[in-house]
Amino acid sequence: MHDPMARAAARLRETQLRVTVQRMAVLTAIEELGGHPDAEAVRGRAQEVTGGLSLQATYNVLRVLTDVGLVRCTQITGQQARYEAERHDNHHHFVCRFCGDIINVDCVIGEAPCLVADLSESYRVDEAAVTFWGACPRCAPAEHG
Ligand SMILES: [Zn+2]
Ligand SMILES: [Zn+2]
């Protein structure tokens, strides 16, 4: 068993989740792919370890990992859900309208939730997730041409 898989196993144990090859492989795939892969990309990578892994099984594992806070799931309108390792850094996302690229945007102001919501004090806000939309550097020139 190579190192990333052992690390994934340790992280699963910390959350009290049963350690399975599928869960280790999916968690490792997300770490190794980096960025914001969708379930199909995660499945492709995880399959190198698990052999046949259905898309449904991949979604099931992703949901479990998201529920325990090891994985962060981001829903972007008009796209498949995207996954990344949860680092609790309260980052936001920039989405390019043209190529669909997603990049991380650091916490906007200071610490979580980093934005002031117009809510009465009886609401306790602990997180804000903002999606910025626009054109990435690769797509911006085309927009003007
Ligand atoms: Zn773009
Ligand atoms: Zn992100």
Image (spheres, grey):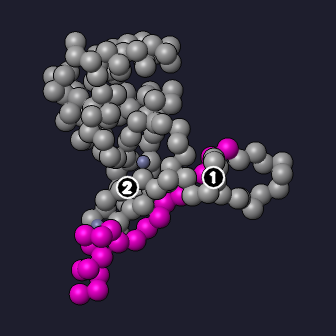
Q: Quick check: 106 above or below 27?
A: below
Within the image, what quadrant is residue 32 found in?
top left
**Which residue is at a point 35% across and 19% down the rendered structure image?**
7
Judge from the rendering whether residue 104 lies leftward or rightward of residue 145; answer left or right: right
Q: Is residue 133 magenta?
A: yes
Judge from the rendering whether residue 136 lies leftward or rightward of residue 131; answer left or right: left
Is 92 in front, or is 61? 92
Q: Is residue 57 visible?
A: no
Q: Horizontal and vertical percent for residue 31? A: 32, 33
Q: Horizontal and vertical percent for residue 133? A: 43, 67
Q: Quick check: 39 above or below 141?
A: above
Mark 1 residue crowding within 10 angstroms, few (<14) / some (14–19) / many (20+):
few
- Amino acid at pointer 2: Ile
Which residues lie in the magenta part? Answer: 126-145
Numbered tag placed on residue 84 in the rendering? none
Q: Tell me the SS state at disc 2.
A: strand
Q: Tell me the SS state at disc 1.
A: loop
Q: Which residue is mark 1?
A: 110
Judge from the rendering whether residue 44 lies leftward or rightward of residue 121; answer left or right: left
Numbered tag placed on residue 103 in the rendering? 2
Judge from the rendering whether residue 9 lies leftward or rightward of residue 116; answer left or right: left
Within the image, what quadrant is residue 72 found in?
top left
Q: Is residue 3 magenta?
A: no
- The C terminus: image quadrant: bottom left
The yes-or-no answer for disc 2 within 8 Å of ligand 2 is yes
- Amino acid at pointer 1: Gly
